Amino acid sequence: MKRLTVGTMLILAATVLGIAQGDRGTSSIDIGGGKVTVEFGTPKLGDRNIEDMIKPGMTWRLGSNAATTMESTVELDFGGKKLGAGKYTLTARCGQDQSWTLLASAGSGAAFEFPLHFSKDSTGQDVMKITLAKAGAGADLTIAWGTHRLHASFKPAN
């Protein structure tokens, strides 16, 4: 009987931990002879208002639970700014007038900063999603949550 109780408790604990950590999403793309992968938590907006949650000057973690990461096996070019191959933690900062900046950092080093294009979509996205999609010789990174859409384009560095 004790084994059944301990076993049941272990299963219950594992289930609770799984729920607490939430779902993770992954998006990847082959580019320039290499691969770029973004891994992120997928929070649900529910009845919360994204405008109340993210204020100008605030840095947004881009997801839930574990940090959102981007790993690239090739050097990338974001509009003339080069980001070396490696694994980075991604965040975004909201500025005045909905100007957004993508921040990529590795360890305690300085963050790579690149402007994100902001738009609103009339269709709400309840579960946050980050996608990578082919765009010519490069790729587009899109972050969608609520009615917010953040977009950046990149290509393999030459």
Image: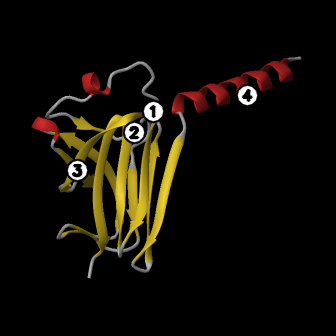
Alpha-carbon distance for marks 1 and 4? 24 Å
> Which amino acid, mark 3?
His
Q: State the residue position of label 1.
A: 43
- Kindly report which numbered mark, 1 or 4, lies closer to the viewer in this rendering: 1
Estimate the x, y position of residue 14 in percent, counting from the top left.
66, 30
Contact (CB < 8 A) between labels 4 and 3?
no
Alpha-carbon distance for marks 4 and 3? 44 Å
- Kindly report which numbered mark, 3 or 2, lies closer to the viewer in this rendering: 3
Alpha-carbon distance for marks 2 and 4? 27 Å
Q: Sort mark 1 into few (<14), some (14-19) or many (20+) by Cα contacts within 10 Å.
A: some
- Kindly report which numbered mark, 1 or 3, lies closer to the viewer in this rendering: 3
Q: State the residue position of label 2.
A: 63
Residue 83 or residue 17, whichever sits in front: 83
Contact (CB < 8 A) between labels 1 and 4?
no
Q: Which mark is residue 117?
A: 3
Residue 111 sits above or below residue 138 on the image: above
From the viewer's perspective, tell me whether residue 4 is left or right of residue 66: right
Q: State the residue position of label 4.
A: 11
Q: Secondary structure at mark 3?
A: strand
Q: Secondary structure at mark 4?
A: helix
From the viewer's perspective, tell me whether residue 2 is left or right of residue 155: right
From the viewer's perspective, tell me whether residue 15 is left or right of residue 115: right
- Evaluate whether residue 107 shows in this view: no
Alpha-carbon distance for marks 3 and 2? 18 Å
Residue at the image point whose x is 34% and y is 70% from the top: 85
